[in-house]
Image (tube, grey):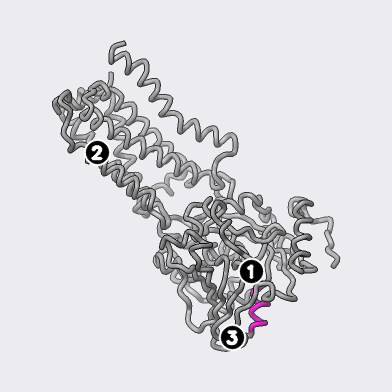
Amino acid sequence: MLIRRSADIPTREITDEKLYWSRREWLAAVGLGTVDVAVGGRAVGWPAQAREELKPTPYDLITSYNNFYEFGTGKDDPEANAHTLKPRPWSVAVEGEVKRPAVYDLDEFFRGMKPEERVYRHRCVETWSMVAPWLGYPLRDVIKRLEPGTRARYVEFVTLLDPVQMPGQRRRVLDWPYVEGLRMDEAMHPLTLLTVGVYGKPLPHQNGAPVRLTVPWKYGFKSGKSLVKIRFVERQPRNTWNISAPHEYGFYANVNPTVDHPRWSQARERPLGQFFMKPTLLFNGYGDQVASLYAGMDLRANF
Amino acid sequence: MTEAQLIRRALKPALWILGLAPLGWQIWAFFTGHLEAEPVKGMEHFTGRTALITLFITLLVTPVRRLTGWNPVIKVRRLIGLFAFFYAVVHFSIFLVFDLQFSFGELTREIVKRPWITVGFTALLMLTTLAVTSPQAMVRRLGKRWRTLHRLIYAAAALGVLHFAWAQKKDIRLPVIYAVVLAVILALRWLPASPRSPSKRMVAEPAP
């Protein structure tokens, strides 16, 4: 496949050569012939102002500062401890209101699909933020192939439960396994990804290998990592942080500068590696694409 | 060397070096890029923990004095206490400058709206009161009331630990350890004193 590079792509948005070639090798290794590269979100088309900010956070920050309690509650714990995770072979169980429920081998799960590079803003509920060049498959394409029934109104995402691979699960700091959920229209939104890589490389263990969710207009905790189960359900699933502290973490968790966390303001965010904060954007800057999903909804009540 | 000389020439300079070391470490980390990925959070957590630990050491002076009977150690208590206050001020200043962008309106709102910040700020006000009344002239002027007033250090330490615990998203193991350490330090006061220990009335004598 021909990948064009137009002259107007800023140098900073072009992956450096070493990464580029390792990406080719990886793609070849996992049998993916081609890749759609959507530099700066061009393919999805968000406003110019937002595009300006999409300078990816350095790889070492993205992969060394993680909330992944399955490997410990400290930000540097996942990088230190996630070597025990075995991302291959990996299977994903599809259950519930769906025509093709089955346990799929991960490589089979995406067969014939092309991963896309999406440079997304990522906003943590704790107020830090980053920009990550994810590599993933639009969840909608996967869902369409699975053919959910009419009673499938929500999708539940379950993370691996295995205290041997995930030593952080030996303590009940959260109600394991980690569960997250999306409304069907959120799951079917073109921005929502099943992410398998970052910076053109397979996801490092600490970032949720081998497959995680990416929902860029919601706080990071909505994006479950190391997924082993996708369930199509009729009722709104409960999500782990909501179970843990219902008054602090809701089901929707849309990024919203006007709805505070009870213990801190969400009006501003601090990009990783920086000292000063910048204003947080409603829906993390993806309002043009996703605001219509929540038309008429009280975002304060449905935080 | 007399005991007074030992304190003046060895113990106090050593305490100055130890007391400034955490600040030095942060300045070094700042200029060499060794701060965390969230540098401001990292500095806030570090200076907050340093303030609490220094406060605990301040609270250890009296039990150490009573248990060992080495009375002159009391002469360094004020210095250590002032270092605890110093780190609490640095901790608060980082919050004010980098998180609130020097907005006193926002500071007021945060203190009023968020109980864990109310608690931390109250502890800071208590430490400020103790620091202001720490010079010898104030000790003399306040007389007996000085000792009563300076019992605020117990409340400040307890509120500081509560503030620490409340700041956690979920995992409170570390603040619980701090609470246990504080409880042990306070419990030491019930142990029988060394026969060389002074009568209680002399405890408030600060360093010259």
Closest to the observer, A161 or B35: A161
Residue B154, x across and y down, in percent: 25, 40
Q: CA distance from mark 3 to mark 1?
A: 24 Å
The chain containing the residue under callout 3 comes to A
Q: Nearer the viewer, mark 1 or mark 2?
A: 1
Q: Chain of mark 2?
A: B
Q: Secondary structure at mark 3?
A: loop
The stretch drawn in magenta includes residue B61 = no
Residue A105: image x %, image y %? 65, 75
Inter-mark Cα distance, 3 to 2: 64 Å
Label 1: chain letter: A
What amino acid is at disc 3?
Val
Q: Nearer the viewer, mark 3 or mark 2?
A: 3
Q: Which residue is mark 1?
A: A89
CB contact under 8 Å: marks 3 and 2: no
Could you tell me the amino acid type at mark 1? Pro
In the image, B187 versus A284, the foreground residue is B187
Q: Position of residue B54 (x, y in %)?
A: 36, 35
Q: Looking at the rendered structure, which numbered label has been put on residue B135?
A: none
Question: Taking A260 as reference, is A144 above or below it?
Answer: below
Q: Which mark is residue A98?
A: 3
Is A192 on the left or on the right of B49, as rendered?
right
Quarter of the image where one finds residue B14 = top left
Callout 3: few (<14), some (14-19), or many (20+) C-alpha neighbours within 10 Å?
A: some
Residue B56 visible, this orientation: yes
User: Circle 1 — which element?
Assistant: loop
Rendered view: A33 above or below A55 = below
Q: Label 2 belongs to which residue?
A: B152
Q: Which residues are magenta?
A: A138-146
Does the magenta segment cover residue A145?
Answer: yes
Q: What kind of element bears circle 2? A: helix
